[in-house]
Amino acid sequence: MSLTAMLKTAASGLNAAQMNLRVTSDNIANVNTPGYVRKQVDQAPLVVGGRGMGVEILGVSRVTDQYLQTASLAASSDASRWSAVSQYLDNAQSLFGNPSDESFYFSRLDDIFSAFAASADDPSSSLLRSQAISNVEDFLAETSRINTQFAELGETVDAKLAADVNRINDLLAQINQMNADISRAKLTSGDASGSENIQAQLIDELSTLMSVQISSKPTGGVIIRSAEGLLLSGEGRAATLSYNRTATTKGYIAVEPENGSGYPQPIQVKGGEIRGLMDLRDTRLPAMVEQLGEFISRGVEQINAAHNKSTSSPPPKVLNGRDTGLDLPSAVGGFTGKTTLAILDKDGLVQSTVDIDFDAGTMSPGGAFTPANFLTSLNTAMGGAATASFSNGALSIAGTGDNRIAIDEGTSMKAGRAFSHFFGLNDMIRSSGMISYETGLKGTDPHGFTAGDTISFRLAQADGKPIRDVTVTVPAGADMNDLLTALNDPATGVGQHGQFTLDAKGGLSFAGNPPQNATLSVTQDLTSRGSGGPSMSQFFGLGAVERAGRSGRLSVDAAISQDPMRLSLATLDLTVAAGKPAVTAGDGRGARLLAAAGDVTTNFAAAGALGPVTMTLTRYAAEFGGSIGRQAQEAETRAKAAEAVNAEANARRQAVEGVNVDEELVRLTTYQQAFNASARMIQAARELFDVLNNMI
């Protein structure tokens, strides 16, 4: 080996040792620096002309493990998702109160039935009546409060989602900028680890917000894509994401078009805090609100059913029904069984009765009737002692002079409700809108909507990503079957992705086709049933917004609230002897019916965590309260499990990427000795040169 080769070899070793010493010193100095990844010098033998000429420095790299990094990011994403879900479900559960407290929401229902039971023992007590009414009002007010706070909780989640999306946009832009810095350092064989560490921290934060696909660039840096492969950051640009949601549709994340031209491109988000928040906003919280609406509406139905079977003492002069949303022929059509309308004086003595047989289509007195002439026939049968009217979907019956009205519902039935209950003639609890969507309509009944009116739907995947927007025009065909055909048309309706069906009680519902199992939202509804009647979504309860609104529009009938003696705690008894009152002040049988309303078997539609079930109201209350607790507990358990996995993944990643002081000290000693060895080699070459020079 020539002296020149010896010197070059020693010099390269000296440079390599210096570089390794510098890198090792950096590692030791940053042993406790968050986000710092251990560095190493990449080197290789330097061969010239087939002979070794020392060592070549290729650059400085971070010590990472791609598999552990991917596992850590995935675990972090999952932990953030379930942490968000657990936090907000815990908040949602707290809205109902503590089950051990007297103020617990579901305990208030028992208080109502206990108050009615107490009234049955002393029906003439104004104090007991007032207490029962107060308990009902408190329950309705508490329901409205919870419903309102659910809406506020949803708005909080919306604000958090918007803030997270803004932060994601900042991170994507910074990650893209770091790519340029890393590439420049790589091209000059410089130390890019500082920029890479900063970029890695940005990626770690990004993974807590949303799940992404990450791949390395050959020139340094990373490329970030969405689950379906849409570019988010890298290749010299960063995407801008947006959170898109309306009051009636599910939210989704989209990539905004460049230069503002074109349409946002929806993307899938499978993990991260964003996924947890979107699940809360569009699935979990709305499901709870819908279940609250189903619970309260069925509870109100049972209380009103018992109240319609009863009457006050003395009976009321006027019975005003609710807006059924139907025209009178459609409302009367489909009834079965018999009912009796009684006209009484102020002392409860029967003056006359009208027996209505829906099966035979007759009234006594009066003879035959049809749904079309029902009102005329009823007024004729009452002979001027009372009058009936129908306006804006509501039936009203008023006594003439001081005459009073009471109804024995008998065996009458339509869509699961007796005559007085179906029309809401003696409802204790009133609603400013529809609370029951079991219309009683059959496929051959007229749908009543104006031909040419439109209703628009959005079909979406379970995660909120839109599939298709559809606008359906009310057909010229007048029957419900015609309307169903238009709604389910594969080309102009929802038929490609699901089907609307009409059940035996006249309820309209949508179910998505597998495997997508699309969900449906109402984006615009310009329909009306008749002139000024309810829209299609209001009438049938289409869309989560309409069903969620049920909980906030209930109140005790104003007349009953102002005068507790109007509370119907008695019953009409048509079996009494002539000259005896059919309604008496001391009768508490109506109060007992109200007290037992919670034990009546009821059909509940699928809502929230519960499918369609048949059980008592009190049992459903227990199931509902339990499901809320189970969901919160399940989310907390999953959050703890995900956090444990995340901690383990980070620990294993840190074991590879982190700095071990003992190992670095060993390396420091090794490179110091290597430096000394290279220096000794240079000294030896100098001494040999001096010897050779002296020999000349």
Image (cartoon, rainbow, N blue to C red):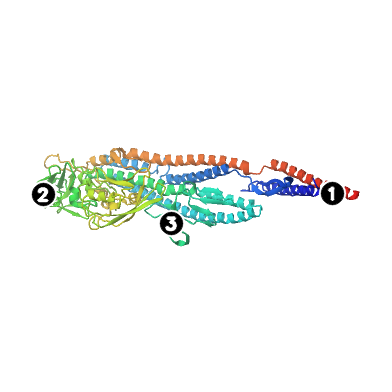
Whole-Å distance between the Cαs marked 2 and 3? 65 Å
Asked which secondary structure carries label 3, the reply is loop
The amino acid type of the residue labelled 1 equals Arg
The amino acid type of the residue labelled 3 equals Pro
Asked which secondary structure carries label 2, the reply is helix
N-term-proximal mark, 2 vs 3? 3
Q: Are marks 1 and 3 in contact (CB under 8 Å)?
A: no
Q: Nearer the viewer, mark 2 or mark 3?
A: 3
Residue 500 spot, x, y in % from top left: 29, 47
Q: Are marks 2 and 1 in contact (CB under 8 Å)?
A: no
Asked which secondary structure carries label 1, the reply is helix
Residue 551 spot, x, y in % from top left: 34, 49
User: Would residue 369 be found to the left or right of residue 15 on screen?
Assistant: left
User: Would residue 678 be found to the left or right of residue 539 on screen?
Assistant: right
Front residue (pair 50, 136) = 50
Residue 522 spot, x, y in % from top left: 33, 53
Q: Residue furthest front?
A: 49
Front residue (pair 189, 48) = 48
N-term-proximal mark, 1 vs 3? 3
Which residue is label 3 attached to? Answer: 264
Front residue (pair 515, 449) = 515
Q: Are marks 2 and 3 in contact (CB under 8 Å)?
A: no
Which residue is label 1 attached to? Answer: 686
Which residue is label 2 attached to? Answer: 381
